[in-house]
Amino acid sequence: SAVISQKPSRDICQRGTSLTIQCQVDSQVTMMFWYRQQPGQSLTLIATANQGSEATYESGFVIDKFPISRPNLTFSTLTVSNMSPEDSSIYLCSVAQGPYDTQYFGPGTRLTVL
Amino acid sequence: GENVEQHPSTLSVQEGDSAVIKCTYSDSASNYFPWYKQELGKRPQLIIDIRSNVGEKKDQRIAVTLNKTAKHFSLHITETQPEDSAVYFCAALGADNYGQNFVFGPGTRLSVLP
């Protein structure tokens, strides 16, 4: 399976600021996704990152708060904008070779907002 | 949309015993059901998966069974070992949204006692 890396691995940020998280894959993948995992909770899909077009957001998540880029088939970024303490969470990217295919996860970014 | 329930939320077994975790899903069109294991501070790792055209799949000590009529699937771990201790998540992939909509269960914390 693909090797997936994320940067940063963790960060502590002040409220009102923004953080951009990077997800890099060592091979081309068709599909990339962004998830949020709050402490002790399950994984919630934020959006599907589509190459060359706008991301597709799940209910409860909006582009202004979580802008996503996907410039090519190996890289995506998620920005958490105007952060508040409620945004403290682990953010994970995942990849799949195609629709209806297995998803593999990156190591995650642990975000703490003070 | 799809809804996935998972039971039990916590499970403690003695080393060598079997563990069973059950998930139910709501969308009869869902057709792919992976199981992920997440150790503390680590990323979710795929351990086994099953598609809707198969009733059972086994990989060494791990097996998954699927009952499409009842809309439930179960993870079976035999001869449990302390290293099986982790949080286990089931997921269901709906047939809508172009195969992108993974919905995760809330997780089961498995403790294997030596």
Image (cartoon, rainbow, N blue to C red):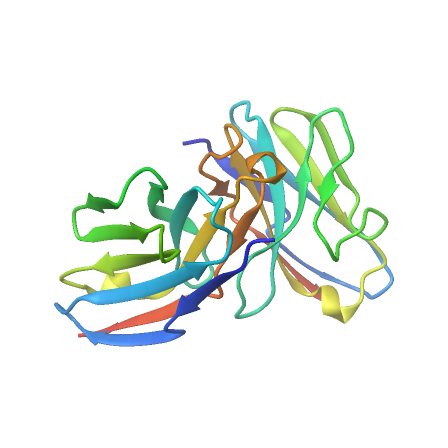
Q: Is residue A4 above or below residue B58?
A: above
Q: Is residue A51 left or right of residue A97?
A: right
Q: Quadrant of residue B114?
A: bottom left
Instruction: Identify the residue at image location x=33%, y=43%.
Output: B50
Instruction: Identify the residue at image location x=74%, y=37%.
Output: A55
Q: Is residue B83 left or right of residue B7?
A: left
Q: Is residue A92 left or right of residue A11?
A: left
Q: Is residue B22 above or below residue B42?
A: below
Q: Position of residue A84 (x, y in %)?
A: 80, 67
Judging depth in this view, the residue of A80 and B75 nearest the camera is B75
Judging depth in this view, the residue of A107 and A68 nearest the camera is A68
Q: Position of residue A39 (x, y in %)?
A: 57, 69
Q: Quadrant of residue B109?
A: bottom left
Q: Is residue B67 left or right of residue A92?
A: left
Q: Position of residue B19 (x, y in %)?
A: 23, 67
Instruction: Identify the residue at image location x=70%, y=50%.
Output: A58
Whether residue B13 is visible:
yes
Judging depth in this view, the residue of B58 and A64 nearest the camera is B58
Q: Residue furthest front?
A: B69
Instruction: Identify the residue at image location x=55%, y=36%.
Output: B99
Judging depth in this view, the residue of A19 and A76 nearest the camera is A76
Whether residue A114 is visible:
no
Q: Quadrant of residue A85?
A: bottom right
Q: Position of residue B20 (x, y in %)?
A: 26, 65
Question: How many labels were placed on the picture?
Answer: 0
